[in-house]
Amino acid sequence: MNQKLKLINNLLEKRSARRKEGKFVIEGPHLIEEAGDKLNFIVYCEKLPIVKKLEDEGVPAYKVSKEQFAELSGVEAPQGVLGVVREFGYQFRDVLKADKTLIVFCVGVQDPGNLGTIIRSADAFGASGIILSKGTVDLYNPKVARSTMGSLFHLPIITTEDEKETIGHLKEKNVKIVATEASAKLNCFNSDLKGPTAFLIGNEGAGLSKEMIGLADESVSIPMVGKSESLNAGVSVSVLLYEASRQKSQPSPSGRGG
């Protein structure tokens, strides 16, 4: 049992451990339920319904004291169960969906909460997948996993070591690359987002580099009528994905779906 607890602590604290083991930690009944067959084992301090269900299904389950669980938990009010989960093995082809391709490409997003919101929005508005640059916060960071509310299990998410190369591959697949830029003259409501689209989302403070903006097919802004100068990355993505989803759902002039 001590080896299990040591593994969990390492996975919670070290990105290098998560990469080496190919596993990460989730906490709470909802995330445990969403993980499905990706679960390796669970640790619990209360015999919740989800614990009995998983035990009946043959998932290894280990009981610890409330004090031991509190030391493992990453939240102020522990929910009594956590699980060790296998990392995903998605490939580039998995984020593509023919003419329905809608991708969020995160380039240097650092805040775990922002990435979690982006993943939830992508799930809600029917994105085909998410691409993360090597400079983006780790998908398997416990705070990221928690803030996705289970959406990280619902769509393909991949990491790329070379943003420029990946953009080139997207263009080869006729995916329109749209950069987000506060100063862009074209706003997202006037951009044609009906076809295969990938939104480039930059770092919360610095935004996208000029080089990345230069690789895009066009840049768009989000029009605002209030006094706020900007939106955070998570909210911006929500607006962009909603608009893209709305446009894609509109019938074409011929009466067929666009």
Image (cartoon, rainbow, N blue to C red):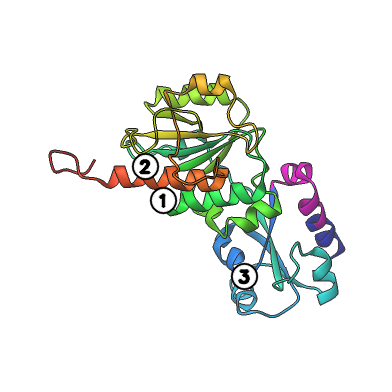
Q: How many C-alpha atoms fall within 10 Å of the one at disc 1: few (<14), some, or many (≥20)?
A: some
The amino acid type of the residue labelled 1 equals: Phe
Compared to residue 49, the image places residue 197 above or below, namely above
The percent coordinates of residue 62 (x first, y second) are: 75, 71
Horizontal side, residue 103 vs residue 34: left or right = left
**Camera-side residue of 231 and 10:** 231
Closer to the eye: label 2 or 3 = 2
Quadrant in which the C terminus is drawn = top left
Is 44 colored magenta in this rendering? Answer: no
Closer to the eye: label 1 or 3 = 1
Is 12 colored magenta in this rendering? Answer: yes
Q: Residue at 44% x, 54% y: name it.
A: 124
Distance from the alpha carbon under mark 1 to that under mark 3: 24 Å
Distance from the alpha carbon under mark 2 to that under mark 1: 9 Å
Compared to residue 1, the image places residue 219 above or below, namely above
Q: Which residue is mark 3?
A: 29
Per the rendered image, the range of residues in magenta is: 9-22
The percent coordinates of residue 160 (x first, y second) are: 59, 31
Local secondary structure at mark 1: loop
- Magenta: main secondary structure: helix
Local secondary structure at mark 3: helix
Q: Is residue 127 visible?
A: no
Horizontal side, residue 229 vs residue 6: left or right = left
